[in-house]
Amino acid sequence: MKTISLLGATGSIGLQTLDIIRKQPETFELSAFSAGQNVEGARKIINEFKPKLVSVLNKEAADRLQFDFPDVKVCHGKDGLEEVAVFEQANTLVNAVIGSVGLEPTLKAIEARKTIAIANKETLVTAGHIVTSAAKKAGVRLLPVDSEHSAIFQCMQGEQEKNVSRLILTASGGSFRDKKREDLKNVTVEETLNHPNWSMGAKITVDSATMMNKGLEVIEAHWLFNLPYEQIDVILHRESIIHSMVEFHDRSVISQLGSPDMRVPIQYALTWPDRLSLPDALPLDLASIGRLHFEKVNFDRYRMLYLAYEAGKIAGTMPAVMNAANEEAVAAFLDRRLTFLQIEEVVERAMEKHQSIQLPELEAIIEADTEARALVRSFIT
């Protein structure tokens, strides 16, 4: 029995994780979860899964839930996230929260020697050197949940890291993959959130349209698979059937294919090195698809992907600054205080004003994050 703590239970990845738990009750049990501000969502999950520990964002909501569910321990805030992450009755943490808020709970879970299924990109983007070092020291495996990283991880089974020549991450191109750059000046929030292939949360869908999501994945791949950025490529693949590829020194390329369904990589992270059936997942029918398309990425068209590569290569606190600036800019765009193209302008300005600190401690990363957010807010207001 895998007993699971789930951070971000009411988000896209969280809900699909719950679906896996729901359909495999003999294999998985939800022991604890966090739900942020979604108190009604938390109520539904408590009623169905009967967890022992729950965390929400604020104390008032926690008090209401505690009154309604006296048999469940309810906590709140940053401390609540960390309490869920290290809950002693869970052996596996699924970190599916969005943003840099996922970093410190991951580090706490590593200290507690939990198995970690990581869907929170920002944990590795902002503090990859700290997280991977801590995981190695504690003997903790970081199992990727992102479809791209799961694909690479699956392609690497039975292979030796020293034989890898190149990682090739595929990208759908997002909502505006058929638009030229000049067509993006007046796109709306609603148009941006209309992703052609995947059903995701608002922030990730915007990041997909700007390609920042792929940039974060490049940095994440650097830390997960211990390869320099020069050996990590991105290619546009509109069908999202090939989820990523690994090229070896002999020029053999192994790819992982499947219909777009995030439950597949989530479940693989929870069951590795085994696999379980996923009966209601759509089988891949290549004959009906007919053709798969690939296209080189244009950094002028997708400026945010270029910025992510630059932040990764500069290293230190720069990725944290880039990520924080992007989070603030995307929030402003969703609130209609920035235009779509202004997102990248704001992020680039924040990066230009930052002097990166190399090999930073956690405190320096948090400080750089905080300063970047304040700087972006000063740009917008």
Image (spheres, rainbow, N blue to C red):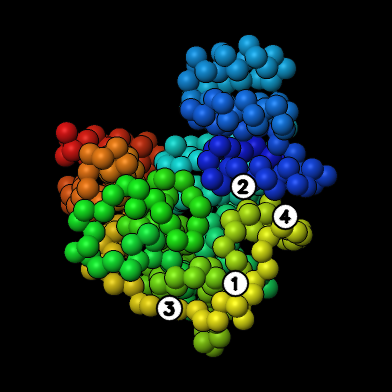
Query: In front: mark 3 or mark 4?
Result: 3
Q: Badge 2, how many Cα within 10 Å: few under 14, some, many 20+?
A: some
Q: Earlier in the sequence, mark 4 or mark 2?
A: 2
Q: Secondary structure at mark 4?
A: helix
- Residue topped by disc 4: 271
128 and 208: which one is in front? 208
- Do the numbered discs 3 and 4 sit on residues whose CB atoms are within 8 Å? no
| Position above or below: 120 against 174 | above
Identify which residue is drawn at 50% across, 57% down. Answer: 198
Q: Badge 4, how many Cα within 10 Å: few under 14, some, many 20+?
A: some
Q: Earlier in the sequence, mark 2 or mark 1?
A: 2
- Do the numbered discs 2 and 1 sit on residues whose CB atoms are within 8 Å? no
Query: In front: mark 4 or mark 1?
Result: 1
Q: Earlier in the sequence, mark 3 or mark 2?
A: 2
In the drawing, does residue 152 fall left or right of residue 375? right
- Do the numbered discs 3 and 2 sit on residues whose CB atoms are within 8 Å? no
Q: CA distance from mark 3 to mark 1?
A: 14 Å
Q: Earlier in the sequence, mark 4 or mark 1?
A: 1
Query: The disc labelled 3 sits on which kind of residue?
Result: Phe
Query: The disc labelled 2 sits on which kind of residue?
Result: Gln
Q: CA distance from mark 3 to mark 2?
A: 28 Å
In the drawing, does residue 231 fall left or right of residue 302? right
Query: In front: mark 4 or mark 2?
Result: 2
- Where's the C terminus, which quadrant? top left
State which quadrant residue 44 falls in: top right
- Residue topped by disc 3: 294
State which quadrant residue 218 falls in: bottom left
Q: Which mark is residue 257?
A: 1
348 and 109: which one is in front? 348
Q: CA distance from mark 2 to mark 1?
A: 19 Å
Q: Which mark is residue 16?
A: 2
Q: Earlier in the sequence, mark 3 or mark 1?
A: 1
